[in-house]
Image (tube, grey):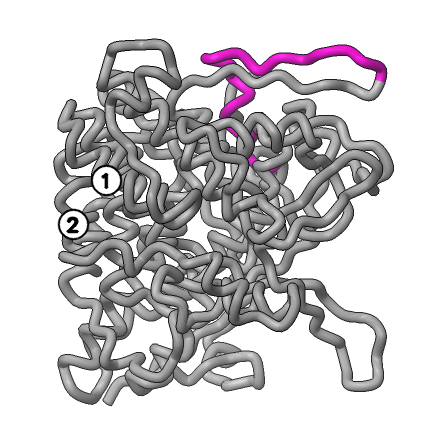
Amino acid sequence: MKRYIIYYGASLILGVTLLTGCDKYLEENPDNRVDLNTTEKAAQLLTNAYSSGGYAFTEWMTDNVTYTNGTTKLPEHVQAYEWNVIFPVSQDTPTNFWETTYDAIAHANEVLAVINDLPGEKAQRDAVKGEALLTRAYGHFMLVNLFAKHYNATTADDDPGIPYPTAPERDFLVQYERLSVQEVYDIVEDDLLAGLKLVDATFYANSGKYHFTRDAALAFASRFYLYKGDWQKCVDYSTQMLGDNPDVFVKDIYGMLKESSNDDDFIRKYTAPTERSNLLMIRQVTNFPVNVGFWPDFNIYEYLFYINPFNSDDDARISSEGYPVYQRGDNGICVNKYEFLFERTSITSNVGTYYTIATAFHGEEVLLNRAEAYAQLNQINPALADLQILARKRYAPNVTLNTTTLRDYYGSSNNQLITLTYALEERQKEFIHEGLRWFDIKRYRYRVQHLLQDGGIITLEADDKRKVLQIPQAAIDVGGLTPNER
């Protein structure tokens, strides 16, 4: 039986932790090393293959927010809101997401390097290998969609992407090159499909949804092919996940509220791993849900949630009987979608870290992915059927969605355009405060305008280079990575 020692330190290039030393040092087994000699230990190591950094900070760059008076605004909040380079390296920043995600990828690579040689049943090894491939693919996929241009088949071969390490590092400083966006997407697809073949929920039967299950992997495939613009494959993988009864993957918000004793009880139900629509849960260190940064005001909420094709002021995502809603600052509004948690450094300490359990993939997203893909394929009836499922869970059980309703609402007879527009508007509503809106802004080249404190207006144009986040400074200065154009 082979013995593998996994060790960590700090790479200034990617934010991955790697220490090296002489052979004698490497033969030792200090406390911070993992003796990776069983499948169970490999599986345990993969709990660190999910990035602790979130991308909800992208909300501050979207049309979901405006200038909010009376909130705490750190430099990174203002820099994000004004689409400037974000220099701080604290949580809720691009640099933090880069570092924590590459660190997660390093854990996946450590497992992939040894898993085929570990003892035990092949089925267990395959399950662990499948999860490692999926986490590696997911990390790189989110990185390339933040730090590179959105995938465009005509330019992806020339668009700079990100590094894609596929093996553990044993050197202190390793020079990486940025692959093209096409190359990154190709490797992500290979890892994703290979992982999807191997993932096995039975190995993690009692672990909640804190690991990639088959449903979560299919949801990832649904998002991947949507962002790639491969509409038919998006439909195919979405359908595999949703099955014959897709409405079970859409939260019954009104039902949750009736069963909840208070707001805290509701949010625990909303984010529970037992909730069918929550497909993958990840622990993330964040201050995002608290009273910081920028938020929607009433005008934004009115536009989003009180204007709809059904002439209804009853939307479960905002109504008096819907999500708990809180004030942020003097004019900001926040829908509470996070259970805000605090981990103390010790039992008696008042010092610690704020974190939340974020939902990386929702059943609702898969349904909306499929509806959008159907619309892009000009298959209007199945697109409307999917959107009808969501509408009856968010507005009222008796609403009817059809082309006549949408034509009257949008004042257009272009069935494909109005169906696609409605699907994208529902995405914006459904995932507000979660960070997904930023990727839709990139995908569809939306312009965004932000109000400044002095009343001025700044604009992010359709093809604005600032839609691509800047590579972290350390990766540029020390690692030699080419910065993005600004």
To which quarter of the image does residue 404 belong?
top left
Q: Is residue 464 magenta?
A: yes
Task: State the SS at label 2.
Answer: helix
Secondary structure mostly seen in magenta is: loop
Q: Residue at x 46, y 48 (%)?
A: 174
Q: Which residue is mark 1?
A: 370
To which quarter of the image does residue 448 belong?
top right
Residue 274 visible? The answer is yes
Q: Mark 1 or mark 2: which comes first in sequence?
A: 2
Q: Which mark is residue 277?
A: none
Please, which residue is most extreme toward the front here?
Answer: 398
Question: Bounds of the magenta span?
Answer: 454-472
Q: Which mark is residue 239?
A: 2
Q: Is residue 317 magenta?
A: no
Residue 13 visible? The answer is no
**Residue type pointed to by label 1:** Arg
**Quadrant, the N terminus:** bottom left
The x and y percentages for residue 253 are: 47, 57
To which quarter of the image does residue 65 belong?
top right
The x and y percentages for residue 93 are: 63, 43
Q: Which of these two is toward me, 388 or 355?
A: 388
Q: Badge 2: how crowded within 10 Å, few (<14), some, or many (20+)? A: some
Q: Which of these two is toward me, 253 or 47?
A: 253
